[in-house]
Amino acid sequence: MLAAAPRIPDAPAIPPGPSRLRVLDLLRFCAALGVVLFHFGETRAWGTPNAFPALSAVTMFGVYGVRLFFLISGFVILMSAWGRTPGHFAASRIARLFPAYWASVLALGGLAVGGLITDHRPSLTELLANMTMLQHGFRVRDLEIVYWTLWQELVFYALIACLAAVGITYRRCLAFMGAWVLLLAIADRVDADLLQAVLVPFSAPYFIAGMALYLIHRFGGSLFPWLFVGMGWILALYSALNEGPPAVRRYGQALGSALVVGVISLIFLVMILVAVGAFVRIDWRWLTFLGALTYPLYLFHHHVGFLLIQWLHPVLGNRVTLPLAVAAALVVAYGVHRLVERPLQPRMRAALERSLTADAAHVPLPETAAASAVPVVPAPVSAPVSAQLSPPTSPPVSPQLSAPVSPALRAPAPYAETPGTGYLPRGG
């Protein structure tokens, strides 16, 4: 059966169906809302760890929304990088991530410096390090507790950029994922800090499975991608159960473990259904709006919600304060998207892509250099009328001079860069 399977070409293919999978926007928003409810239900701003005893039995699983983010990123980032150069891929990711992120560091950092804090008042050096989004690598404390996931994403983007540098193909993706899994095992065995930092063991199972699901979505199901999906699922469960999940402490070892397995398996199942096209009819335009709110909602919700809950719950009570805090976080997310992301993202991306070709005016094109080395053949001069009427007396022209000029030696056409065509997700 395996021998009769169709051969998968390495050449990039154009995926069928719509250019944007809006169901992913819906899933990203649901993941972000799950994280919001988890943080708002567990925050110490209520003054008690049991502000919502019954509700927290459900919202405590919102913490696994981060895992869904990573699984979607594996799918979407490979889709975004396919057929692009590392430079264009980096430009799209920087323009996507940094405008809202800088706004959150400046706004939330300003509130914290002014005394409106959630955990601690940051120093100037902490604020400067957080502006780079590389503070985790510098061992500097995150300004907000949600920033830790951005380091995981950045490392994954760097790995994908390396893959793009050699050219992304089906087989290279399989080799890339296989090497990642093998190195994860080696890093855990030898306890190598450098490998641990590069391979991001916490999020790697989800990134790997998401990449494999994209291969299934693009090229159809075959054995190797499904093996990587299964490997990602196993590694995700292994990691989640080993870290002592809160569900085990609350419900006991048997039931708590079963719930964790069920939630993570549900996340994988939903993304499998996306990959095989089960949700292709979910293509409503308003889902794109929800997807646009996801990133600013994730960045701003914790600080905004903490302050509002702290101020309002003594006056309005817990049941009124919670929906108001969620609504306020959504309003702030819309404001950031409308006032920061929409005007800045396209301008930043255009500027970054222009910067990639800033040397074009100073470096001669190969075609121009080749053309300049060819001697110019003078145009023929018309002979006098008398000479045209008289029989030719000159010896025949050499065939080398009368041969037509090769098209390769003619003046080159004006240079034009064809922009890449591909899916540009609002994800990551």
Image (spheres, grey):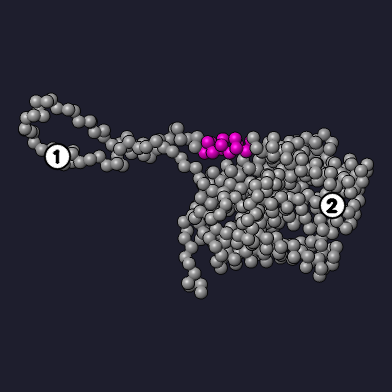
Q: Which residue lies under the disc numbered 2?
A: 42
Chain part drawn in magenta: 344-356
User: Where is residue 4 drawn, in percent x and y?
Assistant: 47, 72
- Kindly tell me whether residue 171 is visible in this rendering: yes
User: Where is residue 152 drawn, in percent x and y?
Assistant: 67, 51
The answer to whether marks 2 and 1 mark residues whose Cβ atoms lie closer than 8 Å is no
- Disc 2 is placed on an element classified as helix
Q: Could you give the CA–CA distance between mark 2 and mark 1, rounded to whole angstroms?
A: 91 Å
Magenta residues, dominant SS class:
helix
Q: Which residue lies under the disc numbered 1?
A: 398
Q: Which of 178 and 401 is in front in this view?
A: 401
- Who's the residue at 60% across and 64% down the image? 228
**Of the residues shown, which amino acid type is indicated by label 1?**
Ser
**Of the residues shown, which amino acid type is indicated by label 2?**
Glu
- Kindly tell me whether residue 182 is visible in this rendering: no
Label 1 environment density (alpha carbons within 10 Å; few <14, some 14–19, many ≥20): few
Apparent side of residue 341 relative to residue 222 in the rendered image (left or right)? right
Apparent side of residue 349 relative to residue 387 in the rendered image (left or right)? right
In this view, the residue farthest toward the bottom is 1
Q: Nearer the viewer, residue 217 or 111?
A: 217
Q: Is residue 3 above or below residue 421?
A: below
Label 2 environment density (alpha carbons within 10 Å; few <14, some 14–19, many ≥20): some
What is the quadrant of residue 186 in the picture? bottom right
- Disc 1 is placed on an element classified as loop
